[in-house]
Image (tube, coloured by chain):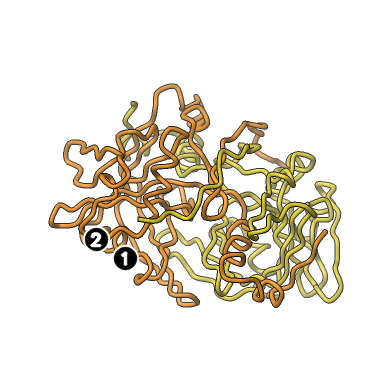
Chain colours: A orange, B yellow
């Protein structure tokens, strides 16, 4: 094994350190978050730091970088409360990744990366039409993480749209059947292969 | 597509709803967290809700369930400050999963599931000897999520131990070469296959 102390890691150049630390924590959920502001300007951004927070109530969070670094998604969510999360499959991952470029506020990433905004009845936030698994969250709380100026944005599940034949009888979504990808670090995209679904562990 | 409103989801029985919501947010990092209390009693528990919080300083968080549901890991971390995170590969995933059973406090899951506690010089917390990627965190902050009584436990990276030949020149850890798994929901384990490492996206 190779050993790396934090002092050694801090001596790496900025990009090397970023890759190292972002990949160390392991594979991640990766999705596109779709929002809209009050003027009707849509926004689309790729997020990989999503986290399951609880099933009852159904809460899902994501880490938003400091406001200066990533202003549009969180501002839109605070303004309009609702936002969509859209899984990414091999047919759209390159476009999804491109949404991480720093487009100015008046440019919609939907248009810039050629993904289709899809509006559903009575829902203001745009979904990604090409996505096979989509869900709608309502903002519940923005929790500041003072250590580094980031935020944990917590939303409650409102509605989910799932490709047919993905849900097993026990409610488990076999998202690999919808070709949902996971990511590693800031730029690695992976397909998955089921090893096993294990039974509930008992003593 | 199948549509599920939150009202329909809430009508599912508890286990079905748990599976549905836990899988909806996508693939997850899955690791074993090793701790020790002041009396020298070790503890090992599987966690899948880890999240990258920042690279400078290097911060990694995980969601801990309410204290009553998952008391030992967080209590040990608060007591002794340091904890280890250990990636899971196909050779140990069944044992790792078994650590989620509710063993009483005086039982070490290391022994119960037959994984080997490994102590390194000057580090109190136990690593998992069988793990190919291991790192040490120091507690920085426990952030309560009042919405459901869970906690975001934030630690700063102190040291990492990586199987040789996993780190690329740019610092990216190709953790699939160490056979690190990801998980889905509370009981699905997956191998991964690299689709692509994409360049930094520019406008």
Q: Is residue B189 visible?
A: no
Chain letter belonging to callout 2: A
Which residue in the structure is indicated by mark 1? Answer: A71
Q: Residue at x 39, y 56 (%)?
A: B202
Q: Residue at x 49, y 42 (%)?
A: B26
Q: Which sits in the foreground, B188 or A85?
A: A85
Q: Which sits in the foreground, A89 or A178?
A: A89
Image quadrant for the N terminus of chain A?
A: bottom right
Chain letter belonging to callout 1: A
Q: Residue A105, labelled with which disc?
A: 2
Residue A5: percent from the left, percent from the top?
A: 74, 72
> Do the residues under discs 2 and 1 have CB atoms within 8 angstroms?
yes
Residue count near mark 2 (Cα–Cα under 10 Å), binned few <14, some 14–19, many ≥20: few
State which quadrant residue A4 falls in.
bottom right
Labels 2, 1: front one: 2
Residue A62: percent from the left, percent from the top?
A: 43, 57
Residue B140: percent from the left, percent from the top?
A: 59, 76
Question: How many numbered marks are there?
Answer: 2
Q: Which sits in the foreground, B56 or B150?
A: B56
Q: Residue at x 74, y 59 (%)?
A: B134
Residue A128: percent from the left, percent from the top?
A: 31, 39
Which secondary structure lies at badge 1?
helix
Q: Is residue A164 visible?
A: yes
Question: Relative to B92, is A12 on the left or the right?
Answer: left
Q: Residue at x 35, y 65 (%)?
A: A142
Is B17 rendered above or below residue A104? above
Discs 2, 1: same chain: yes
């Amino acid at each position: 094994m190779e050993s790396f102390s934090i002092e050694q890691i801090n001596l790496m150049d900025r990009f090397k350190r970023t890759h190292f630390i972002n990949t160390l924590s392991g594979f991640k959920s990766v999705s596109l978050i779709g929002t809209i502001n009050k003027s009707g300007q849509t926004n689309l951004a790729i997020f990989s730091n999503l986290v399951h927070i609880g099933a009852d109530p159904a809460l899902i969070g994501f880490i938003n970088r400091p406001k200066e670094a990533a202003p549009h998604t969180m501002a839109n969510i605070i303004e309009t409360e609702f936002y969509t999360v859209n899984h990414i499959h091999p047919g759209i991952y390159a476009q999804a990744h491109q949404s991480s470029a720093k487009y100015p506020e008046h440019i919609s990433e939907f248009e810039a990366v050629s993904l289709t905004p899809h509006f559903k009845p009575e829902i203001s936030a745009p979904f990604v039409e090409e996505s096979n698994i989509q869900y709608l969250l309502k903002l519940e709380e923005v929790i500041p993480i003072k250590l580094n100026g980031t935020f944990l944005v917590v939303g409650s599940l409102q509605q989910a749209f799932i490709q047919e034949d993905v849900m097993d009888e026990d409610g488990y979504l076999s998202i690999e059947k919808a070709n949902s990808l996971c990511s590693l670090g800031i730029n690695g995209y992976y397909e998955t292969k089921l090893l096993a679904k294990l039974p509930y562990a008992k003593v």
